[in-house]
Amino acid sequence: MTYRMKISHWMGLSDRLDKLGIAYEFKPLRNDGFMYEKKNKDGISKFHIHSIEELDQTTDEMTFTHLLPKSSNFRDGLDAINLASIDAADWHTSCSGMDSSTLKTVSTLSEIFISLGLIRPTE
């Protein structure tokens, strides 16, 4: 399951997140990014959402195949959660028990997805 976003919305996602205190960074020449609360100095290493997305050139949409929240080592093993397979309104609940910085990032991204009409993942 995935979330699909118009490329024009994806191009502005970083700015929207930034205005709400969330950084969205990519490693050069990679299709994965990291979203984390800017005020948390350990955000990029321990408290973030690891996103994996790719451009679907047939629809001109960005496809999020993985949205993996990490709260220190919470994501390891059986604790693995892929938000790309969960309704956006349920993301915060699905991450119950995670660090407040991770929860802030999850909630902020969820609010943006919902505002864009990206409520349920597609198959």
Image: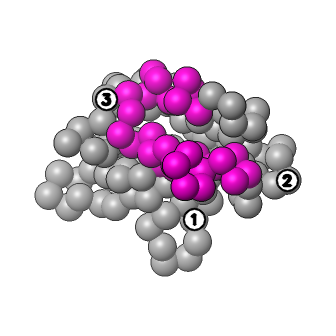
Residue for badge 3: 120
Q: Secondary structure at mark 3?
A: loop
Q: Residue furthest bottom?
A: 29
Tell me the amino acid under the disc marked 3: Arg
Q: Please identify, in this view, whether the residue under mark 1 or under mark 2 is nearer the observer.
A: 2
Residue for badge 1: 26
Instruction: Give yes or no for contact between labels 1 and 2 (Cβ–Cβ under 8 Å).
Output: no
Q: CA distance from mark 2 to mark 3?
A: 32 Å
Residue 90 part of the magenta-drawn span = yes
Spot occupied by residue 15 in the image (x, y as percentages of width and height): 59, 44
Height in image: 67 above or below 100?
below
Residue for badge 2: 41
Scheme by which the image is coloured: one colour
Nearest to the observer: residue 64 or residue 87: 87
Magenta stretch bounds: 67-95
Spot occupied by residue 24 in the image (x, y as percentages of width and height): 61, 52
Dot 2, crowdedness within 10 Å: few (<14), some or many (≥20)?
Answer: few
Residue at the image point whose x is 73% and y is 51% from the top = 72
Q: CA distance from mark 1 to mark 3?
A: 25 Å
Q: Earlier in the sequence, mark 1 or mark 3?
A: 1
Q: CA distance from mark 1 to mark 2?
A: 17 Å
Q: Is residue 7 left or right of residue 103?
A: left
Q: Earlier in the sequence, mark 2 or mark 3?
A: 2
Spot occupied by residue 79 in the image (x, y as percentages of width and height): 56, 46
Residue 10 part of the magenta-drawn span = no
Q: State the quadrant of the C terminus.
A: top left
Q: How many marks?
A: 3
